[in-house]
């Protein structure tokens, strides 16, 4: 059964809270750059909506901004293509 806001193309029910996993080189500006890029596509990215953790060797950082996605073709896909 497909929910009210679901389509056959997606398993998500919009609007929804959606995490976007971003991985990059461990640099001081990583989190700031990540937030700047995501905010170009999502107007309401709350402060503290990003969790970043370093890998075991501390060479890479993984960030996971959580966005409020209203539709697949607007927020989710545009954020993925930007990062």
Image: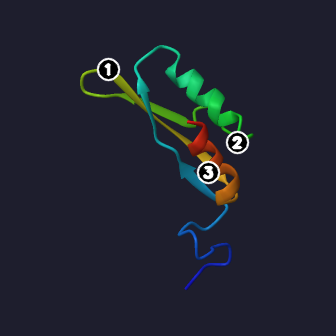
Q: Badge 2: few (under 14), some or many (20 or more) residues near its Cα, within 10 Å?
A: some
- Quarter-of-image position of residue 73: bottom right
Residue under circle 1? 59
- Quarter-of-image position of residue 58: top left
Residue under circle 3? 77
Mark 3 and mark 2: Cα distance apart in space: 11 Å
| Nearest to N terminus: mark 3 or mark 2 | 2
Q: Badge 1: few (under 14), some or many (20 or more) residues near its Cα, within 10 Å?
A: few
Residue beneath the point at 61% across and 68% down: 13
**In the rendered view, would you say 68 is above or below 31?**
below
Report if the CB atoms under discs 3 and 2 are less than 8 Å apart: no
Q: How far across and down, in percent of the image, does residue 8 sit?
A: 58, 76
Q: How far across and down, in percent of the image, does residue 5 sit?
A: 68, 72
Query: Helix, strand, or loop for circle 2?
Result: loop
Q: How far across and down, in percent of the image, does residue 44 sit?
A: 72, 41
Quadrant where the image shows the N terminus: bottom right
Residue under circle 2? 42
Check the image and name the residue furthest to the top. Answer: 28
Residue beneath the point at 61% across and 51% down: 76
* 7 or 63: nearer the viewer: 7
* 6 or 48: nearer the viewer: 6
Compared across the picture, whether 30 is left or right of 16 comes to: left
Q: Nearer the viewer, mark 3 or mark 1?
A: 3
């Amino acid at each position: 059964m497909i929910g009210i806001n679901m389509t056959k193309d997606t398993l998500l029910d919009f609007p929804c809270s959606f995490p976007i996993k971003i991985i990059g080189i461990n640099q001081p500006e990583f989190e700031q750059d990540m937030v700047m890029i995501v905010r170009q596509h999502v107007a309401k990215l709350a402060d503290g909506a990003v969790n970043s953790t370093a890998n075991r060797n501390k060479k890479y950082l993984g960030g996971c901004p959580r966005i409020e996605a209203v539709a697949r073709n607007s927020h989710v896909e545009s954020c993925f293509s930007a990062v």
